[in-house]
Amino acid sequence: ANPRAKRTTRILRRLCYLLLLVLLVSFVVVQAAIEQTAHQAVEHTPSANYVLVLGAGLYGEQPSASLETRLDATLSYLQQNPAALAVLSGGQGSGENISEALAMQRWLTAHGIAQERLVLEDQASSTVENIAFSLPLLAELGEGKEIVLITNDFHLQRADKLAQHYGLRPQLLGAPLPDLPFITINNYLREYFAVIKELLWLTFFPGSLPQAG
């Protein structure tokens, strides 16, 4: 065989091993950060009169399992804090018949929360838009006030970093994922790639992030 071809093959193989090692290490680091943020959120009991709830998928008009756990956490918080108001953020995506914000409002009012306590942000289609598009609504409710951010525990780390980019320092309230292995694995894998993507955005292309409002 051609010595040059052998050397090229050897170099490519080593590069592949190196790439796999980088992916493995970065995956472990990202998951450790996710778990640390989730653990810190559990240790702290939030207390604020303004809540930001991040949307998740619907099946037609029905909340997905992930979204329902966020709604359970929101319901519990609003019941324990009767003066609190909530911004519900989420637009209408593929396979969804209504906006996630409207679905969340319907679910919460059906469980006894007064509609007057719920403010809808129904345009966001991503986590970064959830934060950016909710800022004016949060400002109208209470400029400079403490805010509780509610989402699934695996999602807290990324949501918190994006919130800080927009000048928020929210308290965190994590909703556990449903106890279904496929959902857990799928969400954690998706979250890894989302964290890497948004880390690149925040580091190299901060100007490409949506403007507040």
Image (cartoon, grey):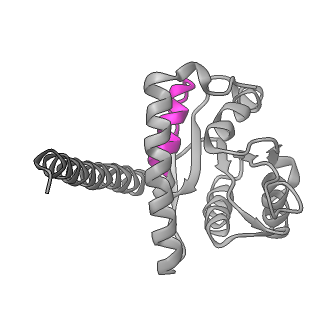
Say how many tags the image has. 0
Predominant secondary structure, magenta span: helix
Image position, residue 137 (x, y; %): 77, 32
Q: Residue at x 78, y 63 (%)?
A: 108
Image position, residue 33 (x, y; %): 33, 48
Residue 172 located left or right of residue 54: left
Q: Is residue 5 visible?
A: yes
- Classify the position of the N terminus by image quarter: bottom left
Q: Quadrant of residue 121?
A: top right
Q: Residue at x 72, y 35 (%)?
A: 134
Q: Residue at x 68, y 41 (%)?
A: 130
Q: Is residue 179 visible?
A: no
Q: Which residues are magenta?
A: 156-170
Of residue 170 and residue 9, the one placed in the foreground of this image is 9
In the displayed structure, 16 sits above or below 66; it is: above
Residue sitting farthest toward the top: 207
- Classify the position of the C terminus by image quarter: top right
